[in-house]
Image: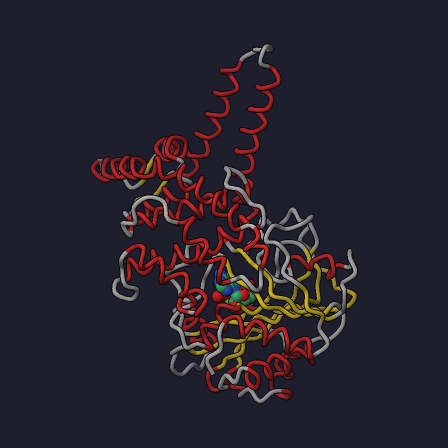
């Protein structure tokens, strides 16, 4: 049955309410009191204090639909059918209450009886050593045992920086893999986007401490996460998350703006999907109080916004266009996230300002970069210098990742280390230029600490995302 994305969200939350769960509203995407994470990237992330016992949950059983941002997936967006930087994660959680025995049959009942997904289309994966999960799947559901595959730590053991972790079981949908007999075949089909993972059931039985060691949690927990866009894609028989009802509603006006038809040319389709996704991300992030800047999550936002603007250029869209389209994004979320509607004017203004700032320099920046690339190629080299990348950053506002992306499209690398050196050098130059001037003392201090935070947070950003993104 073809269900809309909003209908699926309701149906999921209702199902778990009927199993005694308390319905919790989404937390903002900016984490509270959690330095290990730049942005909320899973339903469990804002619930960590409940898992660790630092706070008391409203109920031992909770279900939510959580706004998530995974910038670690940014390079997959537009290329795979299933990745977004912003997505909604449906989740049900047990804080030391029910465990594997309950959740596995419930999950199976929900997808095969409520959503009526044919079980011949489903696959299950479990952690290599998790015989307990295996036996529950075989004995308490009607999944065919030859559709269960055992995978290693990379896929079926879940950890998220420090904090609660454990083995997991995942549910997948076949979108054209043919017959699968081995774990290797299964993994290959997944990589090729022919099998879509959509629900991860995590059996949180350990805690990972700051020093990297594991200890048993007193009461094991359940933490599940199902991508709403992915389950909607499956229910709607769509080719990708971008063809799901509420997301297609955003993609269509972008096509109109660019005067192209979706599905005619792969290159422009990729740009259309990237803009669609990034528009959703920036709208949500700004609503949750992120502002474009050169540090931390502000840098993530700036990077996403400028990348979308650049793909607009690739589609020959002239001038600024993101702020007007963000109204369409907000419209899709009116009922579930009313805060977006309240802040609509503000969000539009923030996007508009950042877009205009980039718009003034993007064309000349691209031209300069293309000149650099030609020079690199003509001199028989394969790497753009750190100085050049820095000049684009400093003068034209190109996030270094954007420079890297454009270079990669032309088969050129970027000297990232040298780029970082340039950042450092500029900081030292600025400090030296100020000398011992005491007259401007107060102002100098302010400038210095600002630059300091740009630099350290820029490096810190990479560390945090490498750590925190799963
Ligand atoms: P994948 O292997 O496809 O990248 P994942 O294993 O990284 O997914 P999990 O960390 O297990 O994903 O998150 C739980 C669920 O959240 C996934 O099963 C999927 O439905 C959804 N999800 C994860 N990442 C994304 C994303 N980038 N865009 C949309 N949905 C996502
Ligand atoms: Mg996975
Ligand atoms: Mg997973
Ligand atoms: Mg992933």
Q: Position of residue 465 (x, y in %)?
A: 54, 49
Is residue 285 rendered to the left or right of residue 404? Answer: right
Residue 154 seen in this snapshot: no
Residue at 78%, 57% (x, y): give it.
55
**For the view shown, which residue lies furthest in the left direction?**
378
Q: Nearer the viewer, residue 37 or 182?
A: 37
**Is residue 373 left or right of 23 when viewed as pictured?**
left
Residue 248's x, y, as percent?
A: 40, 66
Q: Position of residue 434 (x, y in %)?
A: 52, 15
- Side of 405 relative to 47 (left or right): left
- Which is more toward the observer, 155 or 252? 252
At x 36% / y 62%, what residue is drawn?
252
Give the vertical position of 146 relative to 206 (above or below).
Answer: below
**Which is more toward the observer, 374 or 16?**
16
Give above or below for 452 relative to 136. Answer: above
Give the vertical position of 114 relative to 208 (above or below). below
Q: Position of residue 347 (x, y in %)?
A: 51, 47
Quadrant of the rendered image containing residue 104:
bottom right
**What's the coloring here?**
secondary structure
**Location of residue 83 (image quadrant):** bottom left
Q: Give the number of callouts.
A: 0
Q: Quadrant of the C terminus?
A: bottom right
Please say whether residue 469 is visible from this viewpoint: yes
């Amino acid at each position: 049955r073809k269900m809309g994305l909003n209908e699926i969200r309701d149906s999921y939350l209702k199902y778990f309410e009927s199993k005694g769960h308390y319905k919790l509203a989404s937390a903002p995407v900016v984490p509270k009191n959690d330095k290990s994470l730049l942005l909320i990237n899973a339903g469990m992330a804002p619930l960590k204090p409940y898992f660790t016992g630092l706070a008391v949950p409203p109920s031992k059983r909770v279900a939510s639909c959580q706004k998530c941002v995974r910038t670690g997936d940014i390079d997959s967006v537009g290329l795979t059918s299933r990745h977004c930087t912003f997505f909604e994660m449906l989740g049900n959680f047990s804080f030391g209450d029910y465990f594997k025995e309950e959740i596995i049959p419930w999950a199976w009942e929900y997808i095969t009886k409520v959503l009526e997904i044919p079980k011949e289309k489903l696959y299950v994966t479990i952690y290599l050593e998790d015989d307990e999960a295996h036996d529950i799947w075989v004995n308490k559901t009607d999944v065919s045992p030859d559709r269960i595959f055992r995978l290693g730590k990379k896929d079926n053991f879940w950890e998220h920086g420090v904090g609660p972790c454990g083995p997991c079981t995942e549910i997948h949908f076949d979108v054209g893999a043919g017959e699968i007999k081995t774990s290797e075949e299964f993994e290959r089909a997944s990589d090729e986007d022919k099998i879509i993972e959509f629900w991860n059931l995590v059996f949180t039985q350990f805690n990972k401490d700051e020093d990297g060691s594991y200890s048993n949690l007193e009461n094991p927990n359940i933490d599940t996460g199902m991508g709403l866009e992915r389950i909607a894609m499956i229910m709607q028989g769509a080719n990708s998350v971008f063809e799901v009802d509420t997301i297609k509603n955003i993609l269509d006006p972008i096509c109109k703006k660019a005067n192209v038809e979706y599905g005619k040319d792969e290159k422009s389709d990729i740009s259309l999907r990237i803009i669609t996704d990034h528009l959703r991300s920036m709208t949500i992030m700004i609503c949750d109080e992120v502002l474009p800047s050169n540090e931390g999550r502000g840098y993530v936002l700036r990077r996403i916004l400028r990348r979308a603007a650049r793909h607009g250029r690739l589609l020959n869209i002239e001038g600024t266009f993101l702020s007007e389209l963000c109204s369409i994004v907000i419209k899709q979320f009116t009922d579930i996230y009313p805060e977006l509607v309240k802040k609509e004017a503000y969000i539009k203004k923030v996007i508009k300002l950042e877009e205009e700032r980039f718009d003034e320099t993007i064309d000349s920046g691209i031209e300069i970069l293309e000149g650099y690339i030609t020079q690199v190629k003509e001199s028989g080299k394969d790497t753009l210098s750190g100085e050049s990348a820095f000049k684009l950053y400093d003068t034209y506002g190109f996030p270094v990742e954007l420079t890297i992306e454009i270079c990669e499209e032309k088969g050129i690398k970027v000297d990232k280390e040298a780029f970082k050196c340039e950042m450092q050098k500029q900081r030292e130059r600025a400090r030296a230029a100020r000398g011992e001037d005491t007259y401007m003392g107060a102002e100098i201090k302010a400038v210095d600490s600002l630059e300091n935070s740009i630099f350290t947070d820029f490096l810190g950003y990479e560390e945090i995302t490498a750590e925190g993104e799963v």
